[in-house]
Amino acid sequence: SKADDCAINTNGEIPKKDASSSMDDARKSIAQTKSKMLFAGPEENDDCAKEPIPSFSEDPIGACRGVSRRIVLNKAFDPVMGLVILMNAICLGISIDWELQ
C-alpha cells in the first residue's frame, strides 16, 4: 500500500520491500487499469462524455471537439479503425505487388 511505501522505521531507515511483491503490485495495478480501459464505457472512461456539444455557430472548435470525442469514445471506433488499418495494409500490399510485376 502507499502508506507502507512511505513508512520509515524508528531507526530513520526506509524499510526494504521484497522486489517480487513490488512487481506483483505493479502487475496488478496495470491489469486493473487495462481492464477499466477495455471494458468501461464512455461514462467510466471520460467524465466529459455526457457534456452537451455546443452549436457550430457559437463555438466551432468546441463543436468539432465534442463530435470527435463522441466518435472516439464510441465502442465501435476501435474495431472500425482496426479494419481500416487492415484494409490499408492489404491495398498497399496489392499495389506494391502490381508495381513489381
Image (tube, rainbow, N blue to C red):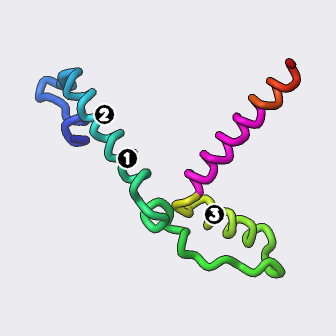
Residue 76 appears at what percent x and percent y? 55, 59
Q: Which residue is mark 3?
A: 71
Q: Is residue 53 above or below residue 10?
A: below
Q: Which residue is mark 1?
A: 33
Q: Which residues make up the magenta segment? A: 77-92
What residue do we see at 37% from left, 46% from top?
Answer: 33
In primary-sequence order, the first of circles 1 and 3 is: 1
In the image: residue 5, left or right of residue 37:
left
What amino acid is at disc 3?
Ile
Q: Quadrant of residue 88?
A: top right
**Residue 100: which disc?**
none
Q: Which residue is mark 2?
A: 26
Q: Is residue 82 magenta?
A: yes
Q: Nearer the viewer, residue 86 or 41?
A: 86
In the image: residue 43, left or right of residue 14:
right
Q: Are marks 2 and 3 in contact (CB under 8 Å)?
A: no
Residue 51 in sight here: yes
